[in-house]
Amino acid sequence: MSAPEKTENAPNAFPGKFISVEGSEGVGKTTNLQFVQNYLKSRNIAFILTREPGGTPLAEELRNLLLTHREEPVSEDCELLLMFAARAQHLQQVIRPALSEGTWVLSDRFTDATYAYQGGGRSLSSEKIANLEKLVVASTKPDLTLLLDVPVEVGIDRAKGRGALDRFEQEQLDFFERVRRTYLLRAEQEPSRFRVIDAEQPLVEVQQQIQQALDLWFEQIQR
Ligand code: TMP
């Protein structure tokens, strides 16, 4: 495979900072999001925690539609558009208002998940996703993205331990291999925004990596 083209991420135009946390199933997002929240609190940062799909009452309804098992096959384009419909609502109601008043946003997933799941997992073209991203997200992109990475088998084993699987979690191994590969490729393409965390390590070590990534990034943005 040829070296991925690197793209620069322009900082968002708002006074608040936007951080997203990404990863495939079973990477430990919930626990590590708690760690990031504690870190931001220790630095006296005013922030909100939100998630995708979801983050507003309407977007949470769309989330339920997306995650629920159904007999009717879901077209890939329908899934993609519902993800972006939820994101449009989330951006307008929650993310942009917070960032514009200087409140930071910590989001459990954002558009990288669409590239990974609908692009990688479902094999939709990245051009199609990029067009919707341009329309819906425009320049409101994360300033920092922590990508929690574990080998797919490890993640799936961890996710299975949590009980009933949703419509995405029931996908097969090769789907999650494509999801992981796409996330890692995006991280290579945007090294200034992404920090890849080896989340297979014991929790203390994972959190040391996150702490170090955040410390360095804070130094960078305070310069
Ligand atoms: P969660 O497991 O992080 O709560 O996310 C719900 C599921 O939605 C997860 O399996 C990933 C999937 N998803 C997409 O397929 N595309 C997206 O754009 C987002 C935000 C999530």
Image (cartoon, rainbow, N blue to C red):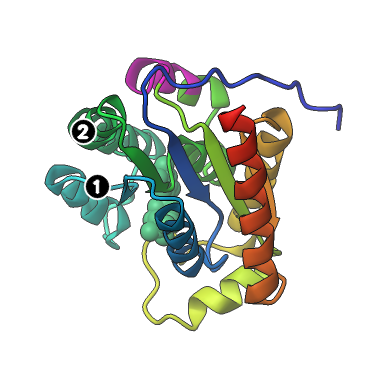
Disc 1 from disc 2: Cα separation: 9 Å
* Residue that appears at 56% across and 26% down: 126
- Residue 20 is left or right of residue 135, and the answer is right
Whether residue 110 is in magenta: the answer is: no
Q: Which of 198 and 72 is in front in this view?
A: 198
Asked if one can make out residue 16 in the rendered structure from this viewpoint, the answer is: yes
- Would you name the residue on which mark 1 appears? 55
Asked if one can make out residue 178 in the rendered structure from this viewpoint, the answer is: no
Could you tell me what secondary structure mostly forms the magenta stretch?
Answer: helix
Alpha-carbon neighbours of circle 1 within 10 Å: few (<14), some, or many (≥20)? many
Q: Residue 89 carries which label?
A: 2
Mark 2 CB lies closer than 8 A to ligand 1:
no
* Residue that appears at 18% across and 33% down: 93
Estimate the x, y position of residue 21 in percent, counting from the top left: 50, 50
Alpha-carbon neighbours of circle 2 within 10 Å: few (<14), some, or many (≥20)? some
Residue 94 sits in quarter = top left
- Residue 123 is left or right of residue 167, and the answer is right
Which one is earlier in the sequence, the residue at label 1 or at label 2?
1
Q: Which of 52 and 48 is in front in this view?
A: 48
Q: Give the range drawn in magenta.
A: 130-139
Which kind of residue does numbered mark 2 sit on? Gln
Q: Is the residue 61 above or below the residue 101 in the image?
A: below
Q: If the image is split into quadrants, where does the C terminus sit?
A: top right
Q: Are marks 1 and 2 in contact (CB under 8 Å)?
A: yes
Q: Is the residue 139 above or below the residue 216 in the image?
A: above
Mark 1 CB lies closer than 8 A to ligand 1:
no
* Residue that appears at 20% across and 44% down: 59
Whether residue 137 is in magenta: the answer is: yes
Estimate the x, y position of residue 151 in percent, counting from the top left: 71, 64
